[in-house]
Image (cartoon, rainbow, N blue to C red):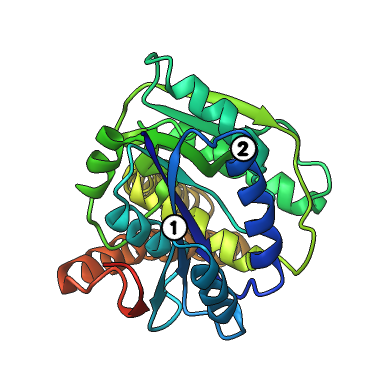
Amino acid sequence: MTLLSIVVPCYNEEEMIPIFYNELKAILNEKLSFYNYELIFIDDGSNDESLSKIKEIAKIDKNSYFISFSRNFGKESAIYAGLQSVKGDYIIIIDVDLQDPPSLIPKMISCLETGKYDSVGTKRSTRKGEPFFRSLFSNIFYKLINKLSKTEIVSGARDFRVFNRNMKDAILKISEYNRFSKGIFQWVGFKTKWLEYENIQRKKGDSKWSFWKLFKYSLDGITDFSTALLSISTIAGIISSILAFIFIIMIVIKTLAFGDAVAGWPSTISVILLIGGIQLFSIGILGQYLSKTFLETKNRPIYITKESNRK
């Protein structure tokens, strides 16, 4: 029988874990009973009772496993750990907050079994219920990254997807420390079918993704899959140099013609501030890329396992 491997990253989700498990289990029993499955919870260093809830499930369900991190390494690390652990023919990544509907899994698998696709991804058709500014900046991010990167990042794409073992093996070959899964899924290629669904609100608990975390995550995505920002800083430097040269010529001509070299200091100060701002902006971009290079050269592990029942 075909084995389904279900990877579920968790961080401080003690309220949602039992609800998620019951809903997923109902789908597995009713619509996917002719498949074997393994359910792998990745506890991303939770500081609530998430791990205890997961262990309770593992006691009653022999197909359930857990990997618990020594601290919070982030969702990207949790996904990578799950993919390293799976043994299935089809791999499913799904969030525990039920904003990824388990009811879509049977349809996703049926699409995969046609043999036409290697992966079935999901994306939200609307962002109904999200804060306005969060939706606004999310849309700006997708437009910006697709302008800067050669790898197309699908707008509204979720980490919720199903793919075959070949694609899983390709993803694991990318062992970089700085990970942006949405980009990695697209970069490895393979044929993907997209399914849309409307935004679903959490049943319990709060999102662990603050605006600041999402902002930093978006910067990681842009710098991980594009070096265009380095070109932008170079172009800005060239333009500012040309403008500065033009201003110098204008000042010399004005001084020779009118003998007034003092007037106009406000505009001079403005130009200095503009050039200084461009320089700091360029240095900041270089710093982002250098910091990522620095972290990669350290060759630190992507995660550290504290406890697991997975052999």
Label 2 or label 1, whichever lies nearer to me, is 1
Q: Quadrant of the C terminus?
A: bottom left
Q: In this view, does 306 lie above or below 42?
A: below
Q: In this view, does 212 lie above or below 110?
A: below
Asked if residue 274 shows in the view, the reply is: yes
Q: Residues within 10 Å of mark 2 (few under 14, many from 20)?
A: some
- Mark 2 and 1 residues: CB-CB less than 8 Å, in contact? no
Q: In this view, does 43 lie to the left or right of 122?
A: left
Q: What numbered label is drawn on residue 156?
A: 2
How far apart in space, not on screen, are marks 2 and 1 (Cα)? 32 Å
Residue picked out by circle 1: 63
Q: In this view, does 139 lie above or below 278?
A: above
Q: Position of residue 118 (x, y in %)?
A: 36, 25
Asked if residue 210 shows in the view, the reply is: no
Q: Which of 223 and 73 is in front in this view?
A: 73
Q: Quadrant of residue 195?
A: top right
| Residue type for callout 2 | Gly
Q: Where is residue 24 in the image (x, y as percent from the top left)?
A: 62, 49
Q: Is residue 23 left or right of residue 160?
A: right
Q: Nearer the viewer, residue 82 or 284?
A: 82
- At horizontal 61% and vertical 67% (from top left) the residue drawn is 212
2 or 1: tag closer to the N-terminus = 1
Q: In this view, does 9 lie above or below 168?
A: below
Q: Position of residue 281 (x, y in %)?
A: 44, 61
Q: Residues within 10 Å of mark 1 (few under 14, many from 20)?
A: some
- At horizontal 22% and vertical 70% (from top left) the residue drawn is 294
- At horizontal 29% and vertical 35% (from top left) the residue drawn is 167
| Residue type for callout 1 | Asn
Q: Is residue 12 left or right of residue 242?
A: right
Secondary structure of the residue carrying numbered label 2: loop
